[in-house]
Amino acid sequence: MAHILIIDDEKSIRKTLSEILGYEGYKLSEASDGLEGLNLFKSKEPDAVLCDIKMPKMDGLEFLEKAKEINPDVPVIMISGHGNIDTAVEAVKKGAYDYISKPPDLNRLLITLRNALDKNTLVAEAKVLRKKVNKTPDMIGDSEPILKIKETIDKVAPTDARVLVTGENGVGKELVARWIHARSNRAAAPLVEVNCAAIPGELIESELFGHEKGSFTSAIKQRIGKFEQANGGTLFLDEIGDMSLNAQAKVLRALQEGKITRVGGDKEISVDVRVIAATNKDLLKEVEERNFRLDLYHRLSVIIIHVPSLNDREADVPLLVDKFLGDICGEYGIAKKQIDKAAMKSLQAHQWTGNIRELRNVVERLVILSGKCITPEDVASYVVPGSGPES
């Protein structure tokens, strides 16, 4: 249950509030003045505070200011028998969650307190989720190819140069794009991702450039495209080799002029977007086969970063396995499993057709199906989907 700090110089008020809140199941701390309250605020770290305004040593408004400097997320509800509208407004301006006059309406007080605690919980959850969403995963590995990629990223990221990331499926091309964006001057702006292979050809233009209401049958309202969403930030065009020639022409124009036009519209819209593209195809071969525009290739490939397959960096397999073991066991709420040296060598010797994505799936399978220590027999049984004693 939540911990509530009550600060009031009137003993009778503290007693009444303690009895009511104690009956509701809250954990309580009490202080008779603002200074004592501030010390308890620092040491007890309460979930919410009920605070009087007129008190000796330190009044409630001064406490409020200092408490907000220490932890701005803790809701402070001000209670006063000497208040007026001006005092209430000043308290709210300084960060109070609410203001209640004495003698307090106990039903209103309880509802206000519950709402404040609910809001605080939602804020905390939102922060955790935001960190998870915004956190750029580590680029695991100290092999020569990975160190070279990291060095290139450090040089390229602060610029606005367009980057083409190449490599097989599952090698981590999206991670390279995220690293570039996170280390760029655009890091505070959005990174917008588009999987060109997952969007039907007839919809890719609407996805990238948006559309006006009524521009086609299902366009029941105006839509903002990915270029506009990424304005000021980075647009990551994954699997760009699968983009239609018609869409390629419009992307080329957007890169050349810094302007786009929504489908069904005639207004030019200026956009400031850094484009990072990725592909698992040989784009020059696609150019020869007339599936990809040469001029667009040259626009995109100012810097080319090739991400090697996992088979070309087997020295990184132990680091990746250790990382995945920690992450997966943590997700399942179990102690991190160990892996036998011979089992690790078997994983290094395996031919990874799905690269890092496949390796993570294999590690998760081993975590689920093996004992406390992963053995060579476990690897032999479970490294291939559908394998195992009961297959």
Image (cartoon, rainbow, N blue to C red):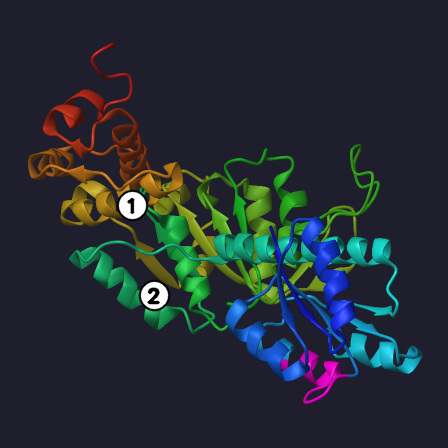
Residue at image point 70% right, 49% down = 23
Q: Residue at x 31, y 56 (%)?
A: 139
Inspect the image, locate mark 1, and give the three-letter code of the amino acid beneath it.
Answer: Gly
Report x, y in % for residue 167: 31, 46
Find out whether residue 101 is within the magenta segment: no
Residue 230 visible at all: yes
Mark drawn on residue 243: none
| Position of residue 292 measured from the top left corner of the image (x, y, whole percent) | 46, 44
Mark 1 is surrounded, within 10 Å at the Cα level, by few (under 14), some (14 to 19) or many (20 or more) other residues, namely: some
Residue found 88% across the figure and 76% down from its top: 81
Quadrant housing the C terminus: top left
Provide the residue span drawn in magenta.
55-66
Residue 326 tag number: 1
Residue 191: x and y in percent read 53, 58
Above or below, 118 against 186 in this view is above
| Residue 309 visible to an observer of this rendering | no
SS of the residue under disc 2 = helix
The foreground one among 242 and 233 is 233
Which numbered disc covers residue 153? 2
